[in-house]
Amino acid sequence: MAGEAGSAGGDRAAATPRRPAFVLHEHRRPTHHFDLRLEEDGVLRSWALPRGLPVDPSRNRLAVAVPDHALDHLRYTDADKSIADLGWWEEHDRNERRLLFTLHGRGAPRRYALIRTSENWLLHQTKDQPAAPRG
């Protein structure tokens, strides 16, 4: 996933920008839930999603912030944890109470907002979604 530098003999001085990764882990124990992990500042920022990603903009999902994980956890699986989705993410806007971002995973890109409440976070699927890539 690392960016690639230009050819050795070329005039390209800048490396291709690297896209931050995300993973959606599905846990089967102790109770079924998902963990959303976004690569940022050398770690995976993580939220537990008891009911998974929202699929309807009219219904938000609880997102509970959990401790950051090391980047080597990106592809981690075991008998009770599998990878439900994997790809890269892009940030569109951020302040102290909201992070607006798009996940580019195995399916069509999906835009979400993580919204801080007084105690936890809510994950919201936005009404405006990015166009599916052509190809």
Image: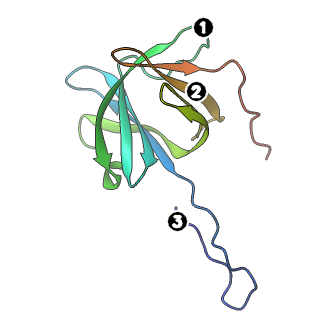
Query: Where 99 sits versus 49, above or below?
Result: below
Q: Residue at x 51, y 12 (%)?
A: 60
Mark 2 — residue? 112
* Residue 96 showing in the rendered view: yes
Residue type of the residue flagged with mark 2: Tyr
Mark 1 — residue? 58
Residue 133's quadrant in the figure? Answer: top right
Q: Which label's residue is closer to the chain start, 3 or 1?
A: 3
Query: Where 100 sits versus 38, above or below?
Result: above
Query: How many numbered dots are placed on residues in this image?
Result: 3
Q: Residue at x 25, y 43 (%)?
A: 78
Query: Where 121 sits versus 68, above or below?
Result: above
Whether pointer 2 and pointer 3 mark residues with C-beta atoms closer than 8 Å, the reply is no
Tell me the SS state at disc 3.
Answer: loop
Q: Residue at x 79, y 47 (%)?
A: 135
Query: Where 122 sits versus 20, above or below?
Result: above
